[in-house]
Image (spheres, rainbow, N blue to C red):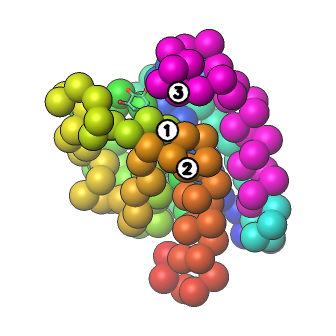
Amino acid sequence: MASILILNGPNLNLLGTREPEVYGHESLADVEALCRAEAATHGLDVEFAQSNHEGALIDALHAARGTHAGVVFNPGAYTHTSVALADAVSGIRLPVIEVHISNVHARESFRHHSFISPVAKSIVVGAGTNGYRLGIAQLAHLIGSGRG
Ligand code: DHK
């Protein structure tokens, strides 16, 4: 069975309690459950991970090579700051779907720029936690069609 990595960056461990008016009431464990359910409908296995540390996220992306067929990645605030994460995404040559729970374009201007978007295969923004579902469906489409 093909597998995918769902990777979450800083502060996403606080989902459910952190600014629920922006990020909703679901916890990261709820998101993991929905990801596993969605992936199962596509016949995909899931590794689910979260880190508050940039280097650990880079290591997780590197480790996905040869292990996973693609990545659904919410880089959190590193989206707007990290050239190193963008280099990791382009370096691993796997399809990466960038997901943001909130509509970053309707928020502060510093959230409008993403270092990840130019190297992501697809982007899902502002769909709430359903964005992870959409990201997995898109990854399944890309993997299944050989366009990953
Ligand atoms: C999550 C964060 O932690 C923010 O720093 C980003 C993103 C937006 C989200 O919407 O999932 O700006």
x and y percent of residue 105 in the render? 27, 40
Can residue 128 be seen here?
Answer: yes
For the residues bearing labels 1 and 2, Cβ distance under 8 angstroms: yes
Tell me the residue at 75%/58% (across/down).
Answer: 38
- Give neighbour class at mark 3: few <14, some 14-19, many 20+ (Cα, 10 Å): many
Give the structural element (helix, strand or loop) at label 2. Answer: helix
Disc 2 target residue: 131
Q: Disc 3 beta carbon < 8 A from ligand 1?
A: yes
**From the image, which quarter does the N terminus lie in?**
bottom right
Q: Quadrant of ligand 1?
A: top left
Instruction: Decide whether the magenta segment is chiefly helix, strand or loop.
Output: helix
Tell me the residue at 82%/62% (across/down).
Answer: 40
Give the structural element (helix, strand or loop) at label 3. Answer: helix
Q: Amino acid at mark 3?
A: Tyr
Q: Disc 2 beta carbon < 8 A from ligand 1?
A: yes
Taking the image as shown, residue 111 lies to the left or right of residue 2, namely: left
Q: Quadrant of residue 82?
A: top left
Tell me the residue at 73%/39% (across/down).
Answer: 32
For the residues bearing labels 3 and 1, Cβ distance under 8 angstroms: yes
Disc 3 target residue: 23
Q: Disc 1 beta carbon < 8 A from ligand 1?
A: yes
Q: Check residue 55 for magenta coloring.
A: no
Of callouts 2 and 3, the N-terminal one: 3
State whether residue 132 is above or below residue 122. above
Of callouts 1 and 2, the N-terminal one: 1
Q: Check residue 25 for magenta coloring.
A: yes
